[in-house]
Amino acid sequence: MSEPESADEMEAPEHHAHAHHGTGIRWVDISLGLAALFTSIVSLGLALMHGHEMQKLVAANSLPYLGVDMSDMESDRKTHAVVLSVSNRGVGPARIDEVTITVDGKPVGTFAELGERCCGRQKSAQVDDGGPLVTNPDDPDVKTSTLRDRMIRPGETVEAIDWPEVQGNHAIVDRLRKGLHSGRIVPKVCYCSVFEECWEMAYLARRPKPVESCPVAPTPYRQ
């Protein structure tokens, strides 16, 4: 019977750390390392580019596009009128931050001021179409809607001013219409997307103009 081995005679198991072995050729090993680093940098760049493109795609799918329009007819297509409206023709909601209306380059703050400045509010009655000329801009037939600080959904239209022609007010309504057509009266809205991209759009303008932000107007149109 053999005697057990002493502690000194027992050998501990060897542990070999796994190490990456190069080719043994210095320039090849350096080239492989540089290639791996280049591949990592390119992969990171592609990932960042993809993320940026995805962000642009999301922004494009949330882009509002407001138009400022004027119609000569009510929706019934029978009644002559001046209908000033703002429509969202884009695919994302629009937040209207500021609204201005200028007459001969000077801003007005209310519909009453607009009527006085553009259309000559008269103190004495005049005859028009067989009846007295209605010159009060606060005519009860006028319907107005507030645009400032308002969200407009895609496909939504808001009629800011709806002034139908009735017996006696043809002349003053026509002056408002001609003022809009000639550019003497300029309604303008400044609006932003949910991503805080902002634009200005004026009546008779071809397309919205990008702006950094919507400045607060000294005399905003509030009505």
Image: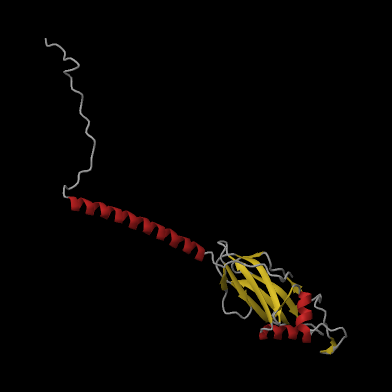
Res 22 seen here: yes
Q: Quadrant of residue 128?
A: bottom right
In the image, 153 versus 121, the foreground residue is 121
- Quadrant in the picture for the C terminus: bottom right
In the image, 219 versus 26, the foreground residue is 26
Res 75 seen here: no
Q: How is the image coloured?
A: secondary structure
In the image, 156 versus 219, the foreground residue is 219
Provide residue 189's location: percent of width, then percent of height: 64, 72
- Residue drawn at point x = 61 percent, y = 74 percent: 201
Provide residue 170's location: percent of width, then percent of height: 78, 86
Provide residue 123's location: percent of width, then percent of height: 87, 83
In the image, 59 versus 19, the foreground residue is 19
Q: Quadrant of residue 16?
A: top left
- Residue drawn at point x = 50 percent, y = 66 percent: 60
Q: Is residue 216 left or right of residue 8?
A: right
Return the residue found at the far top.
Answer: 1
Provide residue 222's location: percent of width, then percent of height: 73, 69
- Residue drawn at point x = 70 percent, y = 78 percent: 102
Return the residue found at the far front.
Answer: 26
- Quadrant in the picture for the N terminus: top left
- Residue drawn at point x = 57 percent, y = 61 percent: 194
Return the residue found at the far right.
Answer: 124
Q: Is residue 166 left or right of residue 71?
A: right
Q: How many marks?
A: 0
